Amino acid sequence: MELEQKKKFFSAIVGMAIITSLVVNIFVVGPIVMIGKADPGDIPHYWHNTTTLNVTVLHFAPRILWYDFQYNQGGTWVSKLNAQIDVNNSAEYRFIVNISSDQGWDDIQFVNITAWYDQGTDSSTYNQTVGGNWNLNLQYENTTGTAAWRMLWPHGGEFTEGTYADIVGFDPYGSIGYTECHNLSFSFVPSYQVRYAPGDGIWNNTYNTTDDAESWNFIMEVTDSGEDAPASSTIWITDEFGVYSYSEIVSAGWPTIIGHPGENATANSNITLLTRSNGNYSLSTDVEDLVHRTFPAATISRELIWVRGGDLDLFDNFTASSGGIYFYGSLGAYHLSRANGTDLTTNDVEYKCNIPLGQMAGDYAAAIRYHLTTT
């Protein structure tokens, strides 16, 4: 037993000696094993090629160098920007625009011209109120290599297409060999009922603006394909012009009434009125007393003559004092302008006469006066 205890004590002493030796060797003398550094030698080159230089070449948008709206005055084109024009189905007008493209003309895809009656506010837009007398849309298309020109709207004869022209021009600010410049012109003839637009009384001649109410506004838009750019680009200019009022009674039928004394005789047939107006309008009729063709002393009072037609559904008779009967509108009030069409046909005008008892037989006649007002 005593021998066993001595062995354990001896083992403990040896273990402590070993631990003490290790500690002293590490912290006082130095580590038992030294890890040395390898000598790498010269490193004269090193390449890193995982990054790139990125350059984006921007696409120049096309430029509108100048534009105009013109009237063909005997072969000479006269500017009508911020001025009124005639609408008589014969006067010729044109939009003309000079466009420059630094990437060549093949980049120009579309030139769209839209014009519209502004309805008294410059915040209005094309086709806001649909109608051939209120809107115009002309287009130049250059997407196939062969240019196409067209009138996209209207199609009811309110405007007649004229001639189109593409003339190569020169841009002094462009780059030789790259920039191409063209003058495009779009001519047309407005018909009789293209909407009246008097302006606000004072035409502002500032270019590229719409600041005169009661006018025709227009926008010229040029769309460039952008070649390999992310998207096409569109530039535009805007301006305005006015339109004179137009009123015309083209034709009126001749009513004929046959009847006996004491009879409320009606005309053999309705007559037709053909009129033209390019604004809000009123249309009235007035007659004189009927006078015997052979014996002028024999008359029939105008108060015995009745008429209806147009918006007047019920017969109305003329009064003793002068004053017309209105088919459309009334005294101081007007029917809204026609959005479409080149004229108005009123084919339901009907006259009748209360022939007094004892009235002399024979033929009587009275002048009829029709009055068309445009405002």
Image (tube, rainbow, N blue to C red):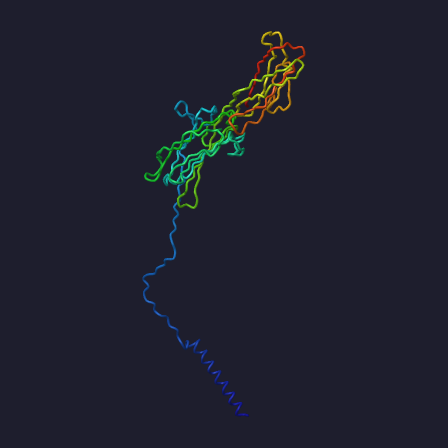
Q: Which quadrant: the C terminus?
A: top right
**37 relative to 355 in the view: left or right:** left
Q: Is residue 55 visible?
A: yes
Q: Is residue 237 visible?
A: no
| Nearest to the observer: residue 325 or residue 86 | 325
Q: How many labels were placed on the picture?
A: 0
Question: Looking at the picture, how far across and down is residue 163, in whole percent?
Answer: 41, 30
**220 relative to 177 in the view: left or right:** right
Question: Looking at the picture, how far across and down is residue 177, in whole percent?
Answer: 32, 39
| Nearest to the observer: residue 30 or residue 325 | 325
Question: Looking at the picture, how far across and down is residue 329, in whole percent?
Answer: 60, 23
| Nearest to the observer: residue 286 or residue 99 | 286
Q: Which quadrant: the N terminus?
A: bottom right
Name which quarter of the figure residue 268 lies in. top right
> Residue at the spot x=62%, y=21% of the render?
308
Q: Is residue 270 above or below residue 102?
A: above
> Residue at the spot x=51%, y=23% of the render?
246
Q: Is residue 48 above or below residue 374?
A: below
Question: Looking at the picture, how far across and down is residue 142, in whole percent?
Answer: 40, 38
Name which quarter of the figure residue 336 lies in. top right
| Nearest to the observer: residue 80 or residue 160 | 160
Q: Is residue 312 above or below residue 136?
A: above
> Residue at the spot x=64%, y=23% of the render?
314
**106 relative to 214 in the view: left or right:** left
